[in-house]
Amino acid sequence: MALCGRLARRAPGFTRQCRLSTPSLSSRAFTSRASASPLALRTSNESSATYRQLRAFSKFAALRNQTQDAPDAKAYMRSGAVPHAKDLVDVKKVLVIGSGGLSIGQAGEFDYSGSQALKALKEAGVHSVLINPNIATIQTSHVLADEIYYLPVTPEYVEYVIQKERPDGIFLSFGGQTALNLGVQMNRLGLFEKYGVKVLGTSVKTLETSEDRDLFAKALGEINIPIAESIAVSTVEEALDAAEKVGYPIIVRAAYALGGLGSGFANNPEELRNLSARSLTLSPQILVEKSLKGWKEAEYEVVRDADDNCITVCNMENFDPLGVHTGDSIVVSPSQTFSDEEYHMLRSASIKIVRHLGVVGECNVQYALQPDGLDYRVIEVNARLSRSSALASKATGYPLAYTAAKIGLGHTLPELPNAVTKTTTANFEPSLDYIVTKMPRWDLSKFQNVKRDIGSSMKSVGEVMAIGRTFEESFQKACRQVDPKFLGFQGAEFEDLDETLKNPTDRRWLAVGQAMFHEGYSVDKVHDLTKIDKWFLYKLQNIVDCTKELEEIGSLFGLKKEVILKAKKLGFSDKQIAKAVNSSEDEVRARRKSFGIRPWVKKIDTLAAEFPADTNYLYTTYNASSHDVTFDDHGVVVLGSGVYRIGSSVEFDWCAVNATMSLNKLGKKTVMINYNPETYSTDFDVADRLYFEELSYERVMDIYEMESASGVVVSVGGQLPQNIALKLQESGKAKVLGTDPHDIDKAEDRHKFSQILDSIGVDQPDWKELTSYEEAKKFAEDVGYPVLVRPSYVLSGAAMTVIRSEAELKDKLLAAADVSPDHPVVITQFIEGAQEIDCDGVASNGNLLVHAVSEHVENAGVHSGDATLVLPPVNLDKRIQERVKEIAQKVAKAWSITGPFNMQIIKQEDPEGGEPKLKVIECNLRASRSFPFVSKVLGTNFIDVATKALVGREVPEPVDLMDVKRDYLATKVPQFSWTRLAGADPYLGVEMASTGEMACFGKDLVEAYWASVQSTMNFRLPQPGEGLLFGGNLENSDLISIVKYLNPLGYKLYAANNEVKQHLEKNAEGVQVEVVEFPVEDKRALRAVFEKYDIRGVFNLAKFRASSLIDEDYVMRRNAVDFGVPLFMEPKTAVLFAQCMSEKLPKKEGIPSEVRPWSDFIGGRPL
């Protein structure tokens, strides 16, 4: 066990003293004394306070020696040995800056850290004001924040809020890069001084030093800490000169950029020319550095208070060597392959750096370490909470964000209690008796033309964290958490295996698996190709050997107790063992249980079980021999959302957390199961018990049986819990609360779904499930093109395609997918130009309790997760809303729904002028991604109502929220991450592409939408006088409407060809459009065109996704994104935003009317 040695080494000083009779003090306990040896006797010129602090824990050891009782830590905390807060910062009202919509590189972890900061403010009795347009988050509720503004996180809007609220302090380190950049900008504009707002925690100067590469290099040079040699440049020519000095291969990074955005590797001048041109559009300054590809990568999380107490809370090591962004790497904590000398060398350097920079709060330091020597380089320092600090908090149980917020308010580490154990102080370094593996989740297959390689710029959309007692156990758990289709460590087919091993893609670990399982590669060969440390590869070899051993046994009855136990200790699932011995999961489970082999439940107590600790933060392992807890709660199990991915994100975490809080209010004990470190639901004080575990049938049943739970909630965590609901009930005999899983199945199965709709008289588009191309062709001819093709059973529009001609149909069904009786496809009539309506509801025993009707701005055919939602709707008359309610009532009754559900309905105009037709296209018997949005806009917590229905307690009477007259509305808009996905075509279709959402309120549609669009990340509003470029579909009048709105404002209008120019000038009066040169194959020349004409906005209305990479419209859309220019590519929203610009520009004096707190819009604080 590599762990044990590390534990002994890392045990903090004071836990060691519990065993020593001599009151010594290890140098680890307080590094604030690093200058003098802490063991030196007290010198005459020392103050008694420092001496008291130095002796505090020794006093504790001495106390223990007198009585020989077990240490009573609570009494120690009460004894006054630790002084109480004296120099607190004097603030009455603090502004907290949120991170905005979720995007690649900045996701749910900032909901978690911001929530922790708000919690700390609440405890301190300080009034909090939060600015965050991300309506799906948990922090944007009055449980945590006193006032909330759903507004863009820009200097302009934040200044308006400061004028209105007059706060005296501001937190910048809890909103990711967005908040940090905002702070730096506002400081430059002198706004903090102007309004007398104190920046709490780390100063803006320190933030600037850590972000500006030149200042950073200078600062680290002062204390002789080596950094990767870099030269900051601001033009392509300078970059080429710098590369000659540094020497190829090199890496380019952008300053002030998020998650390695705009960075990459170049091996020669040609590659560098293209890369630097692209990076300079994202950032004014880029750095040319020597590449250290192949070195080990490590991170340390450091906490420091204003009194200079400084500790390293967690260290992590990347499984992938340097060259892959840490957000795209598999990471383990604590480090496994560092020697004691390496570990302490980097630890000492971290503390030295954080002190020198003057960080107050939390900070992370990333290193490159020479694989075969003691040479290292600092890669970067984040002087804010980052994605890895959320991971470190969950991995160690040390609440970094909460502690950082307390430090920002002036507390010191020794006076803060350890929030998890509640029995020791926060001034300690956690020790772990387990190992954690973080694995990223990518969704690159959802995009066309996207490059699959992973490098220095992050592409993953989410991450999982697995806890085990061996590396193998932890690693295999992580593989399954990333996607239930993986059974554990395994291989997959590759066209060129060696190429993938050399140059990593998002499927790299599968390539390692393929090489070791199926191609017989040795550890040495894999190491030579991948540069992954051999220690990890030998561990993976153990998994391969065990699999082969199981395959040789080959039958269920050949499995002896020892073999099953060995496999379980290496992290094998029942399903994985079943596959190896040609059996089934249920049979292996029964045999395992007959041998009495069950998982053990262990606590994460931050102290490696060396101190009495009372925590509810749990995981399961087979590498143990006893439970750390007793099971007498019989609580309700709530299944969380699992990994964030496109289509399932923070909104489901909001649902899970709210369900848990509602259950607690109803007096029920709760058990949360989730494995996503970015979430608030995996915080130790949300549920009565938190299991950081897989959401598989096997693990959920293990926990359900051990806890002898009273029920399980499957409807608040998105699709993952739904997928195992039926099995939990049928095979596991678990009590599933709410809608019967058989009914859920009737909604998921197209045939059953359709029959029920027909039987209750609810309309739906024509569809058929077909098993051959001939049948499909005939169906398409009957209903007319376009048609929608999809495989049966699918989430978030995955693999759906709109087909517009027979040739496309043939290509799709014969070339792309094998249509056969085993793989049927569903073909649906696709209704063009129809409006889409979303209906979210909650029912109890088939009776509708509450519902919300939102309309989409975009036409049907844009996935509802990518659509702009308006609530209350503006264009749906009362009759339509009533008809939607009637459909909701019928559906609730037909499926006898208890709990949350959601429907998507199409409104198709009648050509004869009769009533429009309403057709149901989808129904999910679970909470949907719009639940937080509708709850917050209507001021009624839908999940709270649903939870009461699930347990049948305090169920409210039905109310019609849509009947209430409101003098406001809100629009929810998508956040895309196109910039990250090199090559992907920014186009909206039936496949979901957005990674997050924002919503803003206003008195009308224009006001709300105006604020919403500006709250998308890095959005820069084109100012009158600048250039706008037009292109795309000319068949309808949308482009003309846009030009009519914008022309009077004084923009310069450009087109890429004559056809667009003539179309616009002919149809809109007094419009002049200039045709610009448009090189489609030379990115650099194109960039020069954008600069020459000062093009600051692009309207390119796409009808179809591009078929080639030199298609003019594709090039225009893709480069707008790459050059950081706002792109409007969907007709309805483009026209709406042009209308907003025409009404809102030029800007008027004073505070705009949309700057109002949420409580003011909805009249109170119901949520």
Image (spheres, rainbow, N blue to C red):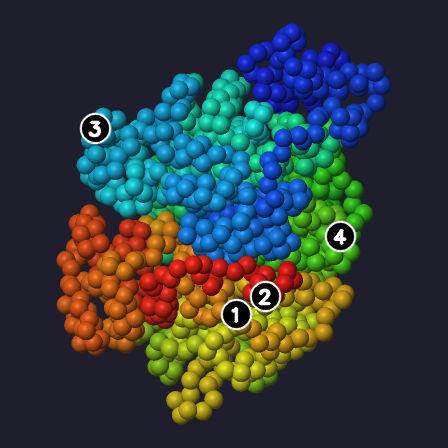
Q: Along the horizontal axis of the image, is 483 left or right of 740?
A: left
Q: Residue at label 4?
A: 669
Could you tell me which secondary element the residue under label 3 belongs to? Answer: helix
Q: Earlier in the sequence, mark 2 or mark 4?
A: 4
**What residue type is disc 2 on?**
Ile
Label 1 CA crowd tier, 10 Å (few <14, some 14–19, many 20+) = some
Label 4 CA crowd tier, 10 Å (few <14, some 14–19, many 20+) = some
Q: Earlier in the sequence, mark 3 or mark 4?
A: 3
Q: Earlier in the sequence, mark 3 or mark 2?
A: 3
**Residue 28, how many percent across, how many down?**
60, 19
Q: Residue at label 1?
A: 968
Q: Nearer the viewer, mark 3 or mark 2?
A: 2
- Image vertical order of residue 28 relative to residue 1094, above or below: above
* Closest to the observer, 450 or 356: 356
Alpha-carbon span between mark 3 and mark 2: 61 Å
Could you tell me which secondary element the residue under label 2 belongs to? Answer: helix
Q: Earlier in the sequence, mark 4 or mark 1?
A: 4
**What residue type is disc 1 on?**
Tyr
**Residue 462, how many percent across, how many down?**
49, 48
**What residue type is disc 4 on?**
Lys
Alpha-carbon span between mark 3 and mark 4: 65 Å
